[in-house]
Image (spheres, coloured by chain):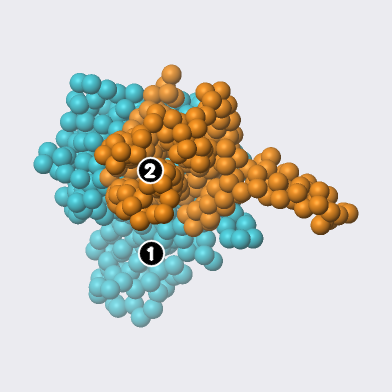
């Protein structure tokens, strides 16, 4: 069962006095299984925030199908299942964090003791210190505001949590706290869909990843299936007479003495055969698997070319 | 029922936001200063002191109400969009209609408090200056409130799709057109009757004046200060009809604002 189902989504912005069209999303399709942590990655301006805002009903779209738990994302009622924190959140700075949480709590139908319990739970989860809660938001640092953004998103105990760049502006401790909060909520059954530029964080906590470049989803699926589809690089260390140049196409000299880099498994096999044929002793073979960053960089380069 | 609750929550937050806004305090204290200034004006004037105090204070109420309706009203929606607080708010299970209507009632509450406070001050001044404080003055204050209720709806309508500067200009434009449309129609009909304009031009001019008079809210209806300061009371049915007239325009303006706001993208 899918929590989010997007199919052939298209979005065009009309900007300027002449309402010039700028295509933001082209045939975007992706699906987020219930109970998963889904990282949505891509360069700036690729369409991550546009997709997220369509999911949260803040943007309209030209065509396609956008569903949350089987119902159209355009409906108001479906938003009861969703918690959302935008990129660089900004709140009413004349309120204290607690007042803000009470305001949002009332909007999602909470009140009384239940609301107070939820507020304490949400602030605790994002490690929003109790002393902060009664200070006006205008005195908050960027990182503190980011935590309050997540706290208000989880206040209604949503089934789906959508976070746009939740780790932006946070120090390493803050990032760790947000990662832990995401994992903790996920363990309680919350599906998390979030965008991030911090690919190491995405790799460490996500079950699935969607990669968007220039308004198109170029890769989607489990992290290892994406990285595995990219061929690993093989570092072959040999001993014997020094080779002056690469004997086979796809092989190049490494940094260390006797180190040769093979671009693919096939090239590696050919190179090993060459070594055996030429009485070169093979010391060791290191396999360097590609990271998400390698795959994304390659996809960006492909899109640009 | 749920929408009603959302409207109340947003209205209360808007009220709280407005009363913590510096613009409101500036306008409020300026109005108080001007009310006291009306006492001095009454003393200096060659006219009857009570009439001067009454008419000046009613004008100050109307003007300060207008400034709050326009400047605070427009900044309410614009600030939500520019500071992007609207993103978290509208991602909650609330309709955009509730948002607009909640904002409207929040500001209306601010205006009501402002006018109630000035009215208390007004009656105290009239009492201590022995200027014959009559209850009929309340009907003039009530109609000022009705007029401002229309202006707030106009301000929200323009701020739902336009920039702050343009919204201010458009709202003030509607305010002045609403006050002058009756005079414009009378003048055009008078000069036509006198034969100073004739032919196709006179027909076009008259049609234009009729259209302006019909489309823009007739805000001149809400200015009865010239009657009440001379202790002429207006009938209850007049007050009822003007209230219904105001409700009609407010409904139309908020309806258009909500429709437009519902179609808007928030980047």
Q: Nearer the viewer, residue A153 or A178?
A: A153
Tell me which residue sits at (27%, 66%) in the image: A237
Can residue A124 be spotted in the picture? yes
Which residue is under mark 1?
A: A262
Question: Subunit of mark 2?
Answer: B
Can you give x and y, in whole percent of width and height, for residue A190 in the image?
32, 30
Q: Position of residue B218 (x, y in %)?
A: 60, 40
Mark 1, mark 2: which one is toward the viewer?
2
Query: Relative to the observer, which residue lies in front, A265 or A73?
Result: A73
**Of residues A225 and B86, the one drawn nearer to the viewer in this rendering:** B86
Which of the numbered marks, if any, corresponds to residue B49?
none
What is the display colour for chain B?
orange
Q: Residue B123: where, in percent of width, then height?
A: 32, 36
Q: CA distance from mark 1 to mark 2?
A: 99 Å
Q: Secondary structure at mark 1?
A: strand
Question: Mark 2 sits on what residue?
Answer: B50
- Against A196, is A302 above or below? below
Q: Is residue B116 left or right of residue B214?
A: left
From the image, state the color of chain A. cyan
Name the residue: 38% across, 59% down.
A294
């Amino acid at each position: 069962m899918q929590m989010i189902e997007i199919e052939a989504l298209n979005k065009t912005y009309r900007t300027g006095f002449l309402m010039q069209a700028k295509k933001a999303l082209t045939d975007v399709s992706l699906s987020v299984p219930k109970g998963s942590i889904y990282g949505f990655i891509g360069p700036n301006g690729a369409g991550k925030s546009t997709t997220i805002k369509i999911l949260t009903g803040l943007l309209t779209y030209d065509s396609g199908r956008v569903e949350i738990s089987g119902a159209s994302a355009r409906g108001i009622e479906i938003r009861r299942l969703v918690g959302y924190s935008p990129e660089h959140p900004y709140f009413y700075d004349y309120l204290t964090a607690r007042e803000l949480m009470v305001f949002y709590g009332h909007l999602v139908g909470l009140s009384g003791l239940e609301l107070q319990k939820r507020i304490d739970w949400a602030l605790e989860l994002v490690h929003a210190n109790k002393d902060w809660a009664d200070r006006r938001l205008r005195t908050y640092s960027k990182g503190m505001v980011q935590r309050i953004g997540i706290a208000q998103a989880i206040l209604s105990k949503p089934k789906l949590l959508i976070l746009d760049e939740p780790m932006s502006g946070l120090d390493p401790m803050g990032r760790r706290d947000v990662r832990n909060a995401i994992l903790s909520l996920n363990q309680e059954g919350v599906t998390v869909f979030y965008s991030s530029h911090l690919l190491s964080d995405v790799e460490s906590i996500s079950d699935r990843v969607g990669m968007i470049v220039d308004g198109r989803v170029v890769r989607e699926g489990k992290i290892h299936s994406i990285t595995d589809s990219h061929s690993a690089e093989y570092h072959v260390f040999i001993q014997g007479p020094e080779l002056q140049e690469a004997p086979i196409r796809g092989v190049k000299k490494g940094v260390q003495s006797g180190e040769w880099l093979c671009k693919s498994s096939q090239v590696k096999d050919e190179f090993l055969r060459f070594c055996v044929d030429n009485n070169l002793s093979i010391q060791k073979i290191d396999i360097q698997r590609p990271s998400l960053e390698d795959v994304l960089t390659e996809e960006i380069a492909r899109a640009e070319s | 029922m749920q929408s009603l609750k959302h409207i109340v929550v947003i209205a209360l937050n808007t009220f709280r936001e407005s009363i913590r806004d510096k613009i409101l305090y500036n306008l409020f204290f300026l109005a108080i200063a001007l009310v006291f200034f009306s006492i001095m004006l009454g003393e200096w004037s060659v006219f009857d002191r009570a009439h001067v105090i009454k008419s000046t204070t009613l004008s100050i109420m109307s003007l300060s109400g207008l400034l709050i309706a326009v400047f605070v009203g427009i900044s309410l929606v614009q600030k939500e969009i520019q500071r992007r607080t609207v993103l978290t708010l509208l991602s909650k299970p609330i309709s955009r209609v509730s948002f607009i209507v909640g904002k409207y009632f929040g500001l209306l509450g601010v205006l009501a408090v402002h006018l109630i406070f000035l009215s208390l001050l007004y009656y105290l001044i009239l009492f201590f200056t022995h200027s014959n404080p009559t209850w009929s003055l309340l009907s003039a204050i009530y109609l000022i409130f009705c007029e401002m209720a229309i202006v707030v709806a106009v301000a929200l309508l323009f701020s739902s799709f336009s920039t702050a500067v343009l919204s201010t200009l458009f709202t003030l434009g509607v305010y002045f057109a609403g006050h002058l449309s009756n005079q414009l129609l009378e003048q055009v009909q008078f000069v036509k009757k006198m034969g100073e304009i004739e032919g196709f031009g006179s027909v076009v001019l008259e049609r234009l004046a009729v259209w302006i008079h019909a489309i823009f809210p007739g805000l001149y209806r809400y200015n009865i200060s010239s009657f009440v300061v001379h202790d002429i009371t207006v009938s209850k049915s007049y007050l009822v009809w003007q209230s219904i007239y105001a409700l009609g325009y407010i409904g139309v303006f908020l309806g258009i604002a909500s429709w437009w706001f519902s179609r808007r993208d928030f980047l």
